[in-house]
Image: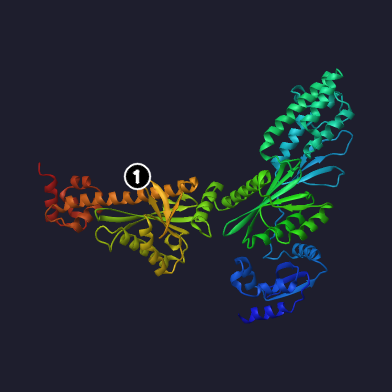
Amino acid sequence: MDDRIKRLRDKAMALPLEPGVYIMRDSSGKIIYIGKAKALKNRVSQYFGSQNNHATKVRRMVENVDDFDYIITDSEFEALVLECSLIKQNTPHYNILLKDDKGYSYIKITKEKWPRIMETKQVVDDNAEYIGPYMSSYYVKNAVDQAHKIFKLPTCSRKFPQEIGKGRPCLNYHIKQCAAPCRGKVSNKEYRKNVNDAVAFLKGSNSLNIKELTRQMNEAAENLEFERAAKIRDRISAVGKMQERQKVVQTKVKEQDVIALATDQERGCFEVFRFSGGRLCDREYFIISDVGDEQTARGEFITGYYSMRDNIPSRITVDGEVEDVETIEQWLSQRAGRRVTISIPQKGEQLRLVQMCHSNGVEHIAQAKGMTGKQASVLEELAELLGMSRLPEYIESYDISNQNGTENVAGMVVFQNGKPLKKAYRRFQIKTVIGQDDYGSMREVIARRLGEYEKLKDTGTGFGRLPDLILLDGGKGHVAAVAPILEQFGVDIPLFGMVKDDKHRTRAITDSGDEIGINSKRKVFTLVSSIQDEVHRFAIGYHRLKRKKSTINSTLTEIDGIGSARAKALLKYFGTIKNIKEADIEELQAAPTMNKPAAVTLYNYFHNDD
């Protein structure tokens, strides 16, 4: 334990066992982290004990701590309130900081005799009612447009009542999408009721359900108010079509937020689905770096997120445990002015919503890496199957190809983010192994590849980077043969073989022990099969090319005066046998390693008939 850690630990051990807030500072005195604690001594001293038990994010923070302050509070709840306030004021580097710099949209309802409903980008002090904010301007525009059509509200710029009776009604009246207040077709009382119903609809009110509207329609029909009954019928039809389109994102819980955390080794994404009136009304996501402990991260995110939001629902559904959940619920309830609960679903509709929310988070992380959510999903599944701690984003695969030990070659293919990266493919001509020895050939190839890494690792590209996973076209014998090479170079890369069945189809993945079946994992099976087929195609293609060149080379060496070196030089110079045949004696003599006698002999060989 170095002197700095010892000094900080001694200071932490002298803290009281009381709730409070601790403030970590670097050597310049800058605040780099703010946290809360139920017992300051216990919490803060944990940072300066063994670093092996800490997440990477915590270790990095501790490496930069030079001193810390603390503030004692009367309760853990007061500590949380103070923590939120101090984080907002100081924006410490190692706290989860949510940037609220996105463009938001609102639904505006004007306060006038003939109110209007419209979309707006900002809230101003004009006595109007505002619904929002919403992240999705598309949702707001769509919702306002649908409210106008369903409740037949005007979208024109005419002023009421000044312009009532002036001019002709617009097209919307004729296609039955406006009640035409401009022509006096609707009273102010009925118009205001339509606006109120539209606002209730936009807020997700239950007062506009189909059953209630059907009752009103039947009542109007019984009273022989057929025109009114027809209007309600049209409204039922419009609302019904709307709800049909929204079924995929409906929930029985009317007001709630669903929050899920998706992570990889480098970053995380908090995805938020916001439900109002049982409908998905908005969604947001926040990409953060270095998540650290997920329970802590969820707690920090929830307090940070709802510090920026005024509309807090009575229920927040999350995908996992939240640190200090009871204290956070108390804080949320105080801010909302009513009880707010945090729940973790185990089954049913709510679990499916959390899973959908998580999938969208995975998609956003994938997009940040330049891949799709499907690609990220299959890599997650492969990593879990192989017991890997990180996604195999960069996979190298190797195969040996020869014919009875001759023209012995190897091919290496690379799959990045689940897709072939052809510019990174490499070919190897086996140099140290004679005859049929696939194990020996594979050892040579991996040793040469890692040797290149040692030379180029400062570049971080090509052979200068290590793969996240190595897949060999072969069984556990290949893995056992190659594993010592990795140990020799001191690299820790997951190493597995791809096993084929007797019909040369991918069957399983194996290490040096048991096989791991992949037939039941459709996405993983498809990826591994495509990798195995691609590396086999690439290796055998190189082998066939070598055989073809060897055959051509042996044809030239049958000619007197043309040895192996001259044959290779001629092929390199002329490119093809056909070009050699068509060359005259002077052109042949001009080729590297050639002289006049050899050129004459070569020319005569191809022109015997002449």
- Residue 162: in sight, yes or no? no
Q: Quadrant of the rendered structure where residue 306 is?
A: bottom right
**Going 67% across and 76% down the picture, which residue do you hit?**
66
Mark 1, residue position? 503
The scheme the figure's colours follow is rainbow
Which x, y percent locates residue 317? 71, 50
Instruction: Give the quarter of the figure containing the N terminus.
Output: bottom right
**Which SS class for mark 1?**
loop
Q: Foreground: 498 or 235?
A: 498
Disc count in the image? 1
* The C terminus - image quarter: top left
How far across and down, in percent of the image, does residue 198 sit? Answer: 80, 34
Left or right of residue 35, residue 543 in this image: left
> Horizontal placement of 387 versus 187: left or right?
left
> How far from the left and from the top, in percent, is residue 172?
76, 26
User: Relative to residue 55, is residue 185 drawn left or right?
Assistant: right
Report whether 550 appears left or right of 519: left
Q: Residue furthest left?
A: 609
Camera-nearest residue between 123 and 167: 123
Can residue 131 be seen in the rendering of this structure? yes
Residue at image point 81% right, 69% down = 73
Vertical side of 239 occupied by 320: above or below: below
Residue 576 at x, y = what percent? Answer: 24, 47
| Camera-nearest residue between 41 and 201 | 41
Q: Residue at x 40, y 50 (%)?
A: 532
The residue under label 1 is which amino acid type? Lys
Residue 495 vertical placement versus 500 (above, below): below
Quadrant of residue 77 in the image?
A: bottom right
Nearest the eye: 605 or 2 = 2
Q: Residues within 10 Å of mark 1 (few under 14, many from 20)?
A: few
Q: Does 499 appear above or below 445?
A: above
